[in-house]
Image: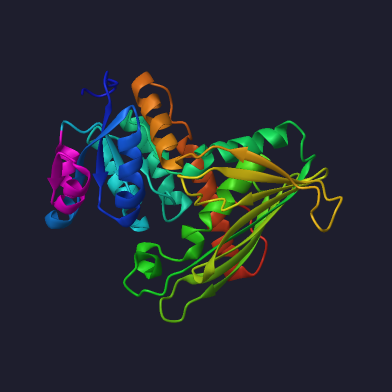
Amino acid sequence: MSPGEAPTGKVRWGILGAARIATERVIPATMACAGAQVAAVASRSLDKARAAADRYGIPTAYGSYEELLADPNVDAIYNPLPNHLHVPWTIRAMEAGKHVLCEKPIALDAAEARKLLDARARTGRLVQEAAMVRMHPRWLGARELIRAGRVGDVRAVVGFFSYVNGSPDNVRNKAECGGGGLLDVGFYPVTISRFLFEAEPVRVIGTLEVDPAFGVDRLASALLEFPSGHATFTCATQLPHHQWVDVHGTKARLGVEIPWSMPSDRPSRLILDDGRSLTKDNLVYLPFGASNQWQVQCERFCEAIQTGRPAPIPIEDAVANMQVLDALFRSSRTGKWERPSES
C-alpha cells in the first residue's frame, strides 16, 4: 500500500506486543471486525508472539517490533506497549507508513503527546488514542440523553474506579514505565467528564497517595471545574474492584454501572433517577444491547482508513486529556488549583 492510499479490502492489522490487553481484548475484537483482519503479531520474545499467533490463527509472528513495522502486508498497528513506549513506537510505526491505534494514556505527558501532531502532519497517517469507552453505545446514549434535556443541566459527574494490583513485576507499578493509577484508570473519568460536559475544565485540583515500595500513586482523588459544573473522581490500584459513575443534573441523576469495563457478552443499562424517592422506587432502567467497545472502536477506525476520513477521535483530544492529567500531577505537588494548559 503506497502512502496515502486506502486499502480496498480489509485493513490488515499488526499487533505491536503480546500484552494481556492485546491477547484478551484487542485481538479477538479486531478479528470480529468486518473490515479488519489480524495479519501479524510481534513481541520481543518470538515464543510469546508465536503462542499468540497459534492461539488465534494469526498468519505471522515476529520476534521484534522492527520486523512488524517493516511488513508491507500490514496497514495499521495497535500499540498496547507500556506507557513510556507509546509515543516512540507510534511515531516509528507512522514513519513506516502504518496507521496507529495506541493504548491509553497516549503519552507520559502533554508535551510528549504533541509530538504526534507533527508525526501526523509529516506522515499523513491516522493516529488515535484508544479511548474505547467513548465508542460504547451506552456512553453515546448517555450524552444524547443529556443533549435531549432528560437530566436537565449537568452540574456534577462523580466517578470511581479501583482494582487490586500488588505485583512488583507489573508495569503499572513501575515509575520508569509511566506507572500508577492516575495514568491508568484515572484516564477514564477524565476523558468521560470532558465527553459529557463537552468542554474542557478551567482548573483542577488533586491529591495522590504514593506506594512507598513502588513509587507510583496507588490512590488519587480529583476535582475538575468545568464552566457549567464539577467532575470528581477517585481511582485506586490497591482497593477492591469497583466501578461506577453518577451524572447529576437539575432534573435527574443518571447512573452508569460498570462504566469502563462492561462485559461485551451481556446487555447494559443506564439508570435514570428523578430523585423523588430516597428508596429509589422511581428508577427507570434504559437498556442497551450487548456491545464490544473494542470491536466498535476498530470498526470506526477501519472505516476512517478506508474512506480517507480523519480519525474518529482526533489526536488533539488526547493532547487535551493529557493536559488535564498533567495539571492533576502538578496540583498534587503544589497543593493548589492548577489550570490545564499547553505549557
Question: Front-most of 42 and 126?
Answer: 42
Question: Front-most of 26 and 336?
Answer: 26
**Residue at image point 67% right, 66% down:** 336
Q: Which residues are magenta?
A: 50-71
Q: Position of residue 254 (x, y in %)?
A: 71, 46
Q: Position of residue 86 (x, y in %)?
A: 34, 50
Point out the residue furthest to the right here.
Answer: 276
Q: Was residue 58 drawn as part of the magenta stretch in this picture?
A: yes
Question: Is residue 223 something one can see in this rendering?
Answer: yes
In the displayed structure, would residue 315 be above or below residue 339?
above
**Residue at image point 44% right, 35% down:** 296
Q: Position of residue 185 (x, y in %)?
A: 50, 58
Image-based side of 30 in relation to 151, left or right: left
Question: Front-most of 242 and 287?
Answer: 287
In the displayed structure, would residue 104 be above or below residue 140?
below
Image-based side of 44 in relation to 162, left or right: left
Question: Is residue 100 something one can see in this rendering?
Answer: no
Q: Was residue 256 drawn as part of the magenta stretch in this picture?
A: no
Assign the N terminus to one quadrant of the image: top left
Q: Position of residue 111 (x, y in %)?
A: 45, 50
In this rendering, the count of numbered labels is 0
Image-based side of 204 in relation to 250, left or right: left
**Residue at image point 47% right, 34% down:** 314
Please name the colour scheme applied to the rendered image. rainbow
